[in-house]
Amino acid sequence: MAAGEFQDFVEVRYGDLLRTAYLLTGSQHAAEDLLQSSLLRVMRHWDRVDEPLAYVRRAMVNQRTSIWRRLRNAEVLTDDPPDRPAEDPMDRVLQRQSLLQALDRIPVRMRAVLVLRYWEDLSETDTAAMLGISVGSVKSQASRGLARLRDVLGVDVLAGRRAS
């Protein structure tokens, strides 16, 4: 196809292509930019294009996808600092050691319920089946076990906060 055919194509299909670009971007200005840059890319390969409308639409979709990827990977700068400072890995090791020592200080069945229920993330039903006890026993043992861990550690075990 010749350059004159490209110009004729753009004049005839500009409105349709702009509408498609608007639907892809959600903004009139962004749609115009997307269509313009896609037409520039397509113009370079115009002599090899068999289905011009489909080709331009595909070029717009590809270009918009590239923009989405760039925006998704962009770092977002804010005036507000993060909610909390990054944790020191050593703090996590110490917390884990404290928790393991506290687990050693509670009865075996309570420890088993807490480990299966919260560490292994089993449901109450699965924990009960695994230990051969009722679901009610799992609930009461978990409640009592968490209370004991709170006393031993002086923290809200599930939230990881120090008790006041």
Image (cartoon, helix red, strand yellow):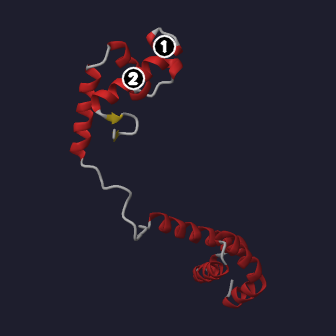
| Image quadrant containing the N terminus | bottom right
Residue 103 image point, x, y percent:
29, 23
Disc 1 residue type?
Ser
Residue at image mark 2: 114
Q: Quadrant of residue 40?
A: bottom right
Residue 3 image point, x, y percent:
66, 89
- The reply to whether residue 115 is in sight is no
Instruction: Answer with left or right where residue 125 lies relative to residue 8.
Output: left
Question: Hey, which residue is sitting farthest front in the picture?
Answer: 164
Residue displayed at 63% across by 72% down: 60
Q: Quadrant of residue 155?
A: top left
Name the element at disc 1: helix
Residue at image mark 1: 137
Q: Earlier in the sequence, mark 1 or mark 2?
A: 2
- The reply to whether residue 38 is in sight is yes
**Residue situated in front as seen by the camera: 59 or 25:** 25
* Viewer-nearest of discs 1 and 2: 1
